[in-house]
Amino acid sequence: MSAERHDYRLLTLALIIFLLSGTAIGLSQTPPGPNTVQHGEGINLPTITATDGYFYGATNVTDQIFGDFTGLPLTGTTLDTGQGAYELYAMDQNVLISSDVNFSSLEADEFFLDSVNKTDEIDSLNQRLGTTDSPTFTNLTLNGPVNGVTLEDGYVYTYGQVYGVEWNQGTDTWRQIDWSSSTITPTTADFNGHPIWGGITRVNLAASGTINARLGDGDYASDGSNGEVMVEIPAFYVKAEQPNSGVYRWWISATPLTGFEIHPAFLQRDGRPQAYIYIGAYEASLMVGTGVHDTDTTLKLHTRSAEQPWTSGEIDALPYDTGSTEFTRGETLTGAISGATGDVIDWTVTGGDWGTNDAAGTVYIKQQAVANFQAENIAGDVSGVAAATGVQVAEALTISDARTYAGNQGAGWGEMGIWSLSAVKLLFIVEYGNMDSQTEVGRGVVDLAAGVGYAGLETAAAGVDGNLDAAGTGVGTGADGDVPATYRYMENLWGNVWMFIDGYNAVDAEYRLIERNGDGTFADALATYEASSMAPIQVDGYIQDIEWDRVMKYLFIASDTTGGSSSTYIPDYQYSHDNGETNILLAGGDWTAASKAGLGYLYSNYVAANGYRNFGARAEYAP
């Protein structure tokens, strides 16, 4: 036998012995990467300082600790636990300890709850425990409260990780609760420090889903010049229960606790869990093509500041030719014969050239007067002269149109869906401990005159963006009821313009909702859906009680509208299902809604073909 082959067999034998010995001490489990820890019940060390603060457990792992521990008291290859020396096995940056040891204290910057169906484990997901940066726990065990920490079923629940709310509909009382349903009084600062609420921000999003900039970056822009202005919402997990008749509870967690599920909003459009969803910061307006004014005539929902929301019939397409100077967005056009006026939103150039004075295409305008443009010269206050080739054509907007125009941005884009609306409502009621959005934030744009045509406000009106606090919440400058209200960077969730809400049908026998698991396809009449166990009510009024079953429990749709008001229960109005129809859903209210409006305001008695001057849309994107 050659020396080389002999050496090879020795190496193989050594490897087999190593693997067998590894199995005996638990090395058959694939160790996690750096900055993680796993431990089984009763496995502790005298002192662990984990500066990175990351702890993670896995099933079927006992009597082991893996971790990248700064300050771990190592002596050679052994660790003195006070109960004897035990061998350590270094595996890259991981440390494995195998023995039946206990620890007397544990130090770490941050601890958090582990994922579902795991026991005897401690996690950290970047949240501080209690009010101290580096808490020390003496004789930490798996039962009972320890220095403000409660351990239950092997999980560590920390203050501020799980927030909830309880509504006792029978007594019309609300209270904020922790994971154990105990009353708490969290502050705005607490929510701002939470990974979900505190992680909500505005971004500039490309059609491809690339984040071009975040609020606070030097190149962030609210005017649409650096991408769609969207609000990024981190994925969260939810739980709901009805412990007694008329008592409802909801919780939100950043981590998948036992009994929690990822909110369905983060599964929509392809069924894969998403780390984030993106909701339009403003109501959507119109963009044509890619915004570079070429031959691309594709209409899209566009989200930007200082623009009129697109509502049915209130943005017009005006054909032109013999253009001599290119239009400028926002300039006013005036008809030489009709005297009609309109402000430029966007335009195409499908023939000719500005330099040769024969540019031709379509200019999209928001009209400022009742008169219509004719086949006449149109003079701009900036750009010079072109000639209208006919009368402008109003651009309709139904729920189907909005779905199409949102989808024209690309894969993952759509109009706001029922589960996204649900997610926003849950974030609000848990944060404020009730659904009275007009009291907690502001009335919104709800007290304006009905007017003619589009009579609401443009996006980011009344300086509202400059008035937002550290949470992204605030109102515009002016009389309450005449200016926008913004919650967590989402403006006009109530007031100004009704929003089409996709993925919802109400028929006489049941509510039909797009599947929570994300497998469904959005449509005017859903082909596949999850059905409620109850029939929709057909009485309009303020919401006094809500529908509740496995499908409806996160939606806040009224089951009773006979005894509510603008200051009790859920203090918003619902227009309920019309007999014999397949109804769609709108939410929020318009510029005349007054006290009926709010985050809970619903319109459920229109059909898909309906579109009006106060019906608009809000874009959303799921990566």
Image: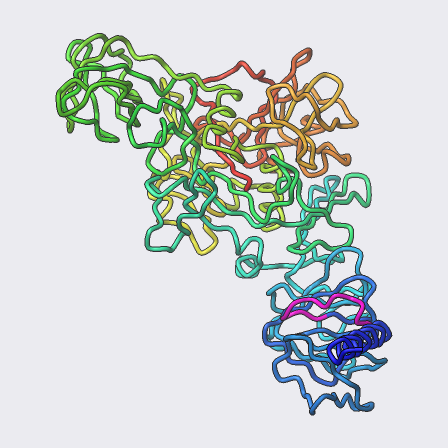
Question: Relative to 249, is 185 above or below?
Answer: below
**Looking at the image, which is closer to me, 105 or 346?**
346
Question: Relative to 318, is 418 above or below?
Answer: below
Measuring 17% from the left and 19% from the top, which residue is drawn there? 323
Measuring 16% from the left and 16% from the top, which residue is drawn there? 322
Measuring 69% from the left and 50% from the top, which residue is drawn there? 251
Question: Relative to 251, is 84 above or below?
Answer: below
Magenta region includes residue 31: yes
Q: Which residues are magenta?
A: 26-37
Res 591 → quadrant: top left
Residue 552 percent coordinates (x, y):
72, 34
Q: Main secondary structure of the magenta part?
A: loop
Magenta region includes residue 36: yes
Residue 412 percent coordinates (x, y):
54, 36
**Looking at the image, which is closer to me, 485 or 423?**
423
Question: Relative to 247, is 108 above or below?
Answer: below
Looking at the image, can residue 517 be seen?
A: yes
In the picture provided, is 8 more to the left or to the right than 231? right
Residue 120 percent coordinates (x, y):
80, 67
Residue 102 percent coordinates (x, y):
82, 81
Image quadrant containing the N terminus: bottom right
